[in-house]
Amino acid sequence: MMNRFFLYYLLFFLVIACADTSSQQSANSTKQLLEEAEEAVLNYQGIETDSIMQLRMEYYHKASTFNDSVHTYRAHFYLGEFYQSRGIYKDAMSEYEKALRHISDDADSARYVQTKIAIATTEIELGNKYKAGEILLDAYEVAQRNKRTMQLINVNGNMGILSLDLKNFQEAKKSFKEAIQTIEEKQLIEKDSINYVEDYINYHMFLAKAYQAEILLDSAMSYIDKGIIIADYYQDIEGKAYLYELKGKTHTAQGKYAEAHENLTASKEIFTDLQNEKQISKIMYLLADNHFQRGETSKALALLDELEARYQQKFLLETDYYDALVLKADVYKSSKQFENESVYRQKSADIQKEIAERQDKTAFFQTATQYEIEKLKNKFEAQHQKDKKRFYSFLAIAIIVIAVFSFLLYKQISKKKAAVVSVTENELEKTVSIAKKEKSTTQTSIKSDKTVDEILQKLKNLEAQEFYLNPKYNLYATAKKIDTNTTYLSTILNVHKKMTFTEYLNNLRIQYTLNRLENDKKFRMYTIKAIAKEVGYKSHGSFSRAFKAKTGENPSTYLKKIR
C-alpha cells in the first residue's frame, strides 16, 4: 500500500512539473504556439517600433526554444525585413545570413531564392549594386534549375529594375522582356490572374521607361499602349492611371503637349476617384509644367498656387514641393517677374536645406531606434537563457523521477502480478465514467460561465463597430480590447462559434465585402488589391484565399459576374 501511494505521489509530481513549464504550452501544441506567434507577426499592421520588434522577438524566442529550424529561419527572415524597412541595412543583412544558415542543406528551395532576393535588395540599398547583380544571378540559376516560374519572374523583374538604376538599359529591357515572355508563353495570367496581372502590367511600364530613357519614344509608347490595354481588360484601374501618367510624360518629351495634357488629365481623374492625394499632386505638377511648355504661364501659376495650398494640407511630398517651387521660379523668370522669381528661388533653397537637415535627423533617430532594439534583443536573450536553464533542470528532474518510478513499478509488478491483473471491468467502466463526467463538467462550466457571455457581448459590440476592417486587430489586440487573454478568447471562439480566430476574422471581412459589393457600385470598380486593403488584409493574396474559401470563387471571377 505504501509503495503504491509513493508511486502515485511521484506520478503526480511529474504531472505538476510538466504543467509548470508553461501554462500556455499546456493549452496548445508546440506547432500551434509557433504558428500563432508567426500569425501575430504577419497580421500586425502598426508602426510602433517596439511593438513590431517585440512580436518578432517573441516569435524568434519560441522558435529557438523549441529548436524548430523552419520557424527559426522565418523568424530571422522577418527580423531582416524589419531592419531593412527601418534602413538598418547591416543588421538586415546579418539576419538574412542567419536565415540562410538554417536552410544550408536546402539550397535549392524556394526559401533560399526568397532570401537571396532579399539580400540583393539590401545590397542595392547599401550601394553595392554590382554585388546585388551577382546575388540575383545566383538566385536566377537556382530558380531556373528547379523550374520555379514565379521566382524566375521575380528575379528577372529585380534584375531589370537594377539595370535600369545602373542605366544599363539594354540589360534592363532584356530582363523585362524575358519576364513578359515567360508570363505569356506559360499563360500564367489565364491560370492565376491575381498573382500575375500586376507584375505583367508593371513590366510593360518599366520596359517603356527603359525605352524612354534611351529617347526611343515611339517604342516606349507602344509598350505603354499595350499596358493600358491589359490594365483595361483586367480592370486594373490604378495601373491604368500610372500608365496614363507615363504616356503624358512621353508625349511631353515628344512635344505633343495637347496629347500629353489629355492623358495627364485622364490620370488625374482616376487618382481622384481613388482618393490618392499625393499622386494627384504629382499630376498637377506635370500639368503645370505642360502649361509652362506651351507658354500658358497664367494656367501654370494657378496650378502651382494650388500645389502650395495642398502642401499645407499635407497632400504634397516635401521633395515634390521643392520641384514645384523651382518650376514656379522658372515661370516667373520667363514672364520677367524677377522679384517673384527671387522669392521662390529663396523658398526652394530653404526647403532643400530643411530636407538635408531632416535626413541628418533621420540618421540620428535610426541610431536611437537601433539602441531600443538592442535593449529588446538583450531582454529576450536573457529570457531565452533562463528558459533553457529551467528546461534542462526540469529534464534532469523528470529523468530521475521516471527512473525511480520505473524501478519501483518493476519491483511492484514482480511482487504483485496478481494484484495488477485483478482490476475488474466494473472498475474500468467506473474510471471511464468519472473521466467523462469530469470532461462534461468542464465544458458545462465554460458554457455557463458568466464571463463567457460578457466576452461574447463585447465581441458583438466590436463587430457592430466593424473592428475587423482595421488590420491592427489580430488575436492579441482583440483580446486586449475586450479585457481577456488570447488563450481564453481562442477557447471561447472554438466552443461557441466553432472556428479559430483567423476563421472568425476572415468570415467577418468577406461577409462585409460581399454586402458592400452588392450595395456599392463604386466599390465594384476597385481593383482586388484595393478591395483587400479596404477590408483589412495585408495582401491581396490572403484576401483572395479567404474569399474563395467562403464563396468558392476567386474575387476576379466574382467581380466579372456582378459588374
Image (cartoon, rainbow, N blue to C red):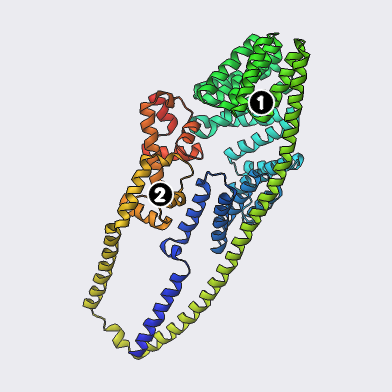
The amino acid type, in three-letter code, at marker 2 is Phe
The C terminus sits in image quarter = top left
Q: Say which mark, if any, is on residue 501.
A: 2
Q: Is residue 554 above or below residue 245?
A: below
Residue 222 visible in the current orientation: no
Q: Assign the N terminus to one quadrant of the image.
A: bottom left
The reply, left or right, for residue 356 in relation to residue 18 is: right
At 50% from the left and 46% from the top, the residue drawn is 43
Q: Judge whether residue 309 can be spotted in this image.
A: yes
- Give coordinates of residue 538: x percent, y percent: 51, 40
Are there few (<14), some (14-19), or many (20+) residues within 10 Å of tag 2?
Answer: many
Question: What is the secondary structure assignment of the residue under circle 1?
Answer: helix
Question: Which image quarter: residue 276?
Answer: top right
Callout 2 touching callout 1 (CB < 8 Å) = no
Does dot 2 land on a helix, a strand or a loop?
helix
The vertical placement of 12 against 287, above or below, is: below
Residue 46, quarter of the rendered image: top right
Of 124 and 515, nearer the camera is 515
How many neighbours does mark 1 have within 10 angstroms: few (below 14), some (14-19), or many (20 or more)?
A: many
Type of the residue with mark 1: Leu
Q: Is residue 110 above or below residue 202?
A: below
Q: Residue at x 42, y 41 (%)?
A: 468
**Identity of the residue drawn at 64% across and 34% down:** 157
x and y percent of residue 260 in the render?
A: 64, 13
Residue designated by label 1: 207
Residue at 36% x, 27% y: name it. Answer: 519
